[in-house]
Image (spheres, rainbow, N blue to C red):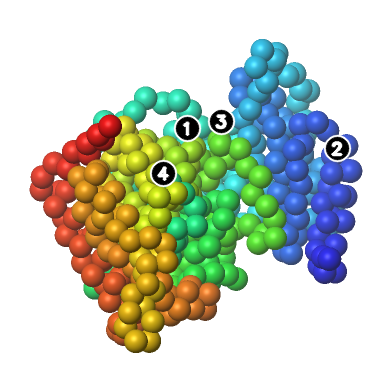
Amino acid sequence: MFGSKGKTRQKQADAVMKALGSPDWLESVSVDESGRAVLVIVADPADTAGAEALRMEAEGKAGLVPGVESVTTVLTAERQQGAAPRTHTHAPAPPKGQPKGRSELLNLTPSPRRVQKGARLSDEAMQQGAPQRQQGSVAKIPGISRILVVASAKGGVGKSTVSVNLAAALAKTGMKVGLLDADVYGPSIPTMLGTQGAEPKGSKNKKLVPVEAHGLKTLSIGYLSDPDAPMIWRGPIVMSAITQMLNDAEWGTPEDPLDVLVIDTPPGTGDAQLTIAQKVPVTAALIVTTPQEVALADVRRGAAMFTKTAVPVIGLVETMSYFQDPAGNKHYLMGHGGGQRMADALGLPLLAEVPMLQAIREGGDKGVPAAIGDEETAQAFHELARKVAIGLDTLETKAPPEIVFED
């Protein structure tokens, strides 16, 4: 059962829906505890004027609903195949004095215009089916020296755990490190860093200021959304959110940049992963897997995607490699040697074999990454961080290794 706060938010969402007349172009409405209403509108990408009129009309009416303090509009550019563009009458501007929303990643419009507090729609994020990028063809993001994506072709293999602890271990060496949670459907970074209640602030330059924790600069869609609300987002919204978290945030400056930004990507090889691989100046990728065959079968897909998009893979990380009992005996519950065999088949190094340790799980649950300590539990991540740093430096001096797929 939902609590009283949940019921109140649902009533407010219903009131907004009713105020707008429950039109077919309004996909969903949600209202969070702060009174921010989020409207998801289905708009015709060929009719930008009509989409803008819809947005203005929806925001104006929603802003008049009691209890609504601000309004955020998400336009998903989708049109039925063969459908004619919609026609809309021009809607009046929102009432004067209507409250404005805080800095958001979700203020999307179908045209490249600036909106509230720096959020903007990226042309690049809205382009689908773009040609594969060529190495060096994507412009660098000011304030970020290198970008490392941590990926897995299958969920549940410990990718986020590796991302958090790797970033923390790199930061402990003195590097300036950022961590971007691009897993928009299941953002877990706030929990693993103990920052669930944090909210990014807006800077004087109208950009998001990342939340700082354990020596890391972090951003996650989890900071900006209701934790109880499902992320029922189409591809263009996902791509726009990721692109904006990269471009509309103060990760660093050209004079004082991040040494590396670690991106925790969603599992699989879908829209989010392709957007990052094609549209982001990724320095390298790190692939996470477990030893069993069911996970290894998908590693090839992930490696192939990065190969096709000209992103070098610096190596594999095997998690849940073994369990060690109090007597020192190792038990290979998930299989043995699978990560090494796959790394050999791909011509890549196996950078780490992370055991199944209670301390790693507890660190993630408590918001204190195991890697920030000095005990034996942290050593696997410290060694991984050392190898990753060497791998990133090597990529700047010689060509990436060629990945060969054999039948």
Tell me: 140 left or right of 50.
left
Tell me: 316 left or right of 183.
left
Residue 323 coordinates in the image, percent (x, y): 39, 74
Give the class, few, some or many, for how many residues have Cα within 10 Å of label 1's Cα (few <14, many ≥20). Answer: few
Give the class, few, some or many, for how many residues have Cα within 10 Å of label 4's Cα (few <14, many ≥20). Answer: some
Q: Mark 4 or mark 1: which is in front?
A: 4
> Which residue is identified by label 3?
111
Residue at left 70%, top 25%?
A: 50
Tell me: 205 left or right of 77.
left
Give the class, few, some or many, for how many residues have Cα within 10 Å of label 2's Cα (few <14, many ≥20). Answer: few
Report the quarter where the N terminus lies.
bottom right
Say which mark, if any, is on residue 22.
Answer: 2
> Which residue is identified by label 1?
123
Question: Of label 2 and label 1, which has the lower sequence position?
Answer: 2
Q: Are marks 4 and 2 in contact (CB under 8 Å)?
A: no
Residue 402 coordinates in the image, percent (x, y): 18, 38
Residue 56 coordinates in the image, percent (x, y): 72, 37
Instruction: Give the residue type at disc 3.
Output: Ser
Depth order, front residue of 130/97: 130
Mark 1 falls on what kind of element? Answer: helix
The answer to whether any part of residue 368 appears in the image is no
Q: Mark 2 or mark 3: which is in front?
A: 2
Q: Is residue 186 above or below residue 24?
A: below
Say which mark, if any, is on residue 146.
Answer: none
Q: CA distance from mark 2 to mark 1?
A: 30 Å
Residue at left 24%, top 44%?
A: 345
Q: CA distance from mark 1 to mark 3?
A: 8 Å
Question: Of label 1 and label 3, which has the lower sequence position?
Answer: 3
Say which mark, if any, is on residue 298.
Answer: 4
Q: Are marks 2 and 3 in contact (CB under 8 Å)?
A: no
